[in-house]
Amino acid sequence: MNASITSATSTATSATATRSRRSAGLRRTAIAGATALGAALSLLGTAPAQAAPESTRVYVWATGVNMRSCNSFQCPPYSNVKVSTMYVTAYCQNRGDVVSDGPYRNDWWVQVDAGGPRGWISAVYVRGGSNMSPIPGVSQNFGDCAF
């Protein structure tokens, strides 16, 4: 072989090897990028198995408020459970029996957790409401109630 042909062949082989190494590196980078993108997209599409019920904190302004297992006088008050002047976790509210106490009157009941059993109290005793109206900020969706 002549020297100029050998040199040209060697240069071509070297250029081909460099392009091959660059292509392999780009392929690895593209594959890694696609894998990362796929993982990120799969995380975005994942929904929680079951969302926790919505809740909010409300203040019970009265003392000795009875808590019941339903929003009606049909359910007797829990024995030895009274809610008094404290913040409680409210999950939902629903209409039930009308409760009157002095100038206050309401047919809305609020499902609460006061650190003991979960139960229902009249909205009459929750700060922020008005007569015959739901408590602002507490869900009216019965599906948000925790059972």
Image: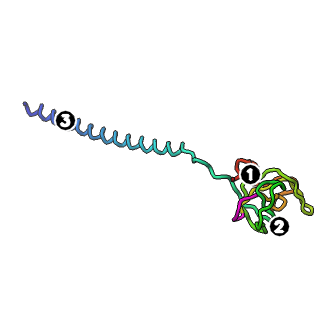
N-terminal of the pair, mark 2 or mark 3, is 3
Question: Magenta stretch mostly in which secondary structure?
Answer: loop
**Does residue 43 sit above or below 117 in this rendering?**
above
Q: Which mark is residue 62?
A: 2
Q: Which residue is mark 1?
A: 139
- Relative placement, left or right, of 25 versus 5 is right
Secondary structure of the residue carrying tag 1 is loop
Within 10 Å of disc 3 (Cα), the crowding (few <14, some 14-19, many 20+) is: few
- For marks 3 and 1, give the one nearer the viewer: 1
Residue type, numbered disc 3: Thr
State if disc 1 and disc 2 touch (CB < 8 Å): no
In which quarter of the view is residue 74 placed? bottom right
**Does residue 22 sit above or below 86 in this rendering?**
above
Q: Residue at x 57, y 47 (%)?
A: 49
State if disc 3 and disc 2 touch (CB < 8 Å): no
N-terminal of the pair, mark 2 or mark 1, is 2
| In-front residue for pair 33/8 | 33
Residue type, numbered disc 1: Ser
Q: Residue at x 78, y 54 (%)?
A: 70
Q: Which residue is mark 3?
A: 13
Span highlighted in magenta in the image: 114-119
- Relative placement, left or right, of 8 versus 98 is left
Q: Residue 64, position in %: x, y?
A: 81, 68
Within 10 Å of disc 1 (Cα), the crowding (few <14, some 14-19, many 20+) is: many
